[in-house]
Image (cartoon, helix red, strand yellow):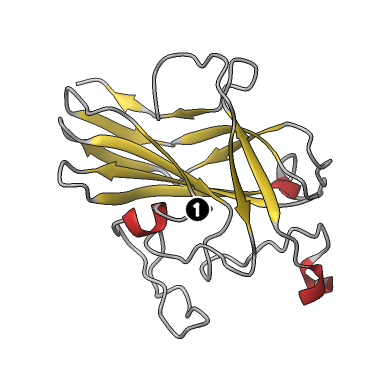
Amino acid sequence: MLSDKAPGAQPPDKYAYDPRYPVPTYGGHGSGGGGITRDGAFSIQGPMDQRGIQQRNDVLVYTSGELSADTEVTGVVELNLFFSTDVSDTDFFATLSDVYPDGRTILITEGAMRTRYRDSIQKTTLLTPNQPYEIKIPLWETSNLFKVGHRIRLHVTSSNFPRFNRNLNSGKAMADETEDDIRAAHQVVLHDSSHPSSLSLPVIPR
């Protein structure tokens, strides 16, 4: 869950990302259809309900308690993520949603990080497998009023296809990758006192 209390000795969360079965694009920023999936369906953009996506085994979901007052979030949202993985390069996608009392989970904003670019977009740096890392994932600027009785939700995964190309987790340049280079990545998200993963929200006082 999302909480304003500091973490203690909490176990990590884990999931497997297989590029052969990516999380499909459903909602998000953009002005067009975003592409066509392999089964011929269009990817859909905009403030779409994320409940179907969030039921997948390769998606981690964190939700706040019900809000006791209207809460305005205006500005840049940022996820500070501690993680490890068993591959040399992988992706992380973060999505912020507004959970309505009836269960609808409406996408508000999102962000992504290809870990080879965590230090610089000009120079790539591959990961050492199974070593903890810290990355900051900025989400697009937003302005949303989370109403009283609503909840704030974050989900984390490693693909958003076809809006974004799949990371095959090989560590190679995209132009050099083939089907034989596809690797499943076993992702570990840490959120304990030594690895305090957190979501920063620009809350505007009333």
Point 15% across, 46% down: residue: 102
Q: Judge left or right: residue 119 versus residue 97.
A: right
Q: Judge left or right: residue 99 versus residue 167.
A: left
Residue 15 sits above or below residue 6 on the image:
below
Residue 75 sits above or below residue 168 on the image:
above
- Place residue 195 in its image quadrant: top right
Residue 205 sits above or below residue 52 on the image:
above
> Which quarter of the figure is the C terminus placed in?
top left
> Which quarter of the figure is the N terminus placed in?
top left
| x and y percentages locating residue 52 in the rendered image | 35, 59
| x and y percentages locating residue 161 in the rendered image | 53, 67
Point 32% across, 26% down: residue: 203
| x and y percentages locating residue 35 in the rendered image | 48, 77
Q: Looking at this rendering, what residue extends furthest in the bottom direction? A: 40
Point 25% across, 20% down: residue: 205
Q: Is residue 24 visible?
A: yes
Q: Which residue is mark 1?
A: 57
Q: Is residue 178 visible?
A: no
Q: Amino acid at mark 1?
A: Asn
Depth check, front residue: 57 or 79: 57
